[in-house]
Image (cartoon, grey):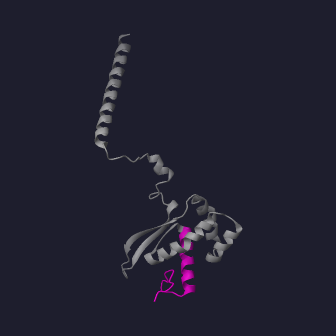
């Protein structure tokens, strides 16, 4: 029976599972994106979200608490110095899981897990995507308004060119 089963045991004893999740967490902090099985990715997200929340407040106590989970000074430094400030205003949901198909050898579901704020392609709030200037438009009357604006632009462009040619003719006569 599954009474009180709160997390996926991943077919391992508790110590082995904790070591696995710690190693996956260190790899994710170091590389910002890793590929693993879907079950491990989901377990990693549950394991890592509280650690990233602690990284938002850079204090000695929080560093020691996170170090008790990971036992890796380089990963702690990266988490608190680089990742923490970048995700400081986000209220949660720091990780994204993307399914990428099946593994050839045993056909297990594979997934890519990554930090949301460190992927510029999928991150709509990045400065580069804001600079692109795409705006959302309503579907109502879009074609009619678009033809009206293009017609107005054509008339203004034609009047501007007519004025320019008239000004050039006046200059030539003088």
For the N terminus, the quadrant is bottom left
Left/right placement of residue 153 relative to residue 20 reads left
Residue 5 spot, x, y in % from top left: 50, 83
Write the residue at 46% across / 75% down.
36
* Residue 158 magenta-highlighted: no
For the C terminus, the quadrant is top left
**Which residues make up the magenta segment?**
1-30
Left/right placement of residue 76 relative to residue 143 reads right
Left/right placement of residue 16 relative to residue 112 reads right
Residue reaching furthest to the front = 3
Residue 75 spot, x, y in % from top left: 61, 70
Residue 70 spot, x, y in % from top left: 61, 75
Closest to the observer: 23 or 11?
Answer: 11
Residue reaching furthest to the top = 174
172 vs 153: above or below: above
* Residue 10 magenta-highlighted: yes
Residue 158 spot, x, y in % from top left: 31, 26
Residue reaching furthest to the bottom = 1
Write the residue at 32% across / 22% down.
162
Write the residue at 30% across / 35% down.
148
Splitting the image into 4 quarters, where does residue 74 fall?
Answer: bottom right
Write the residue at 50% across / 50% down.
127
Closest to the observer: 10 or 159?
Answer: 10
Number of numbered discs: 0
């Amino acid at each position: 029976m599954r009474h009180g089963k709160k997390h996926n045991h991943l077919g391992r004893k508790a110590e082995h599972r904790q070591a696995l999740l710690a190693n996956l967490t260190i790899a994710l902090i170091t590389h910002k994106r890793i590929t693993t099985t879907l079950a491990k990715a989901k377990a990693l997200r549950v394991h890592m979200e509280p650690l990233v929340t602690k990284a938002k407040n850079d204090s000695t106590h929080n560093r020691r608490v996170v170090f008790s989970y990971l036992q890796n000074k380089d990963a702690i430094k990266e988490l608190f110095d680089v990742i923490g400030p970048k995700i400081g205003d986000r209220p949660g949901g720091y990780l994204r899981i993307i399914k990428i198909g099946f593994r050839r050898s045993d056909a297990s579901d594979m997934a890519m897990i990554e930090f949301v704020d460190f992927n510029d392609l999928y991150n709509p709030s990045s400065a580069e995507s804001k600079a692109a200037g795409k705006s959302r438009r309503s579907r109502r009357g879009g074609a009619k308004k678009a033809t009206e604006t293009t017609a107005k632009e054509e008339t203004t462009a034609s009047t501007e060119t007519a004025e320019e040619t008239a000004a050039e003719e006046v200059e030539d006569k003088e």
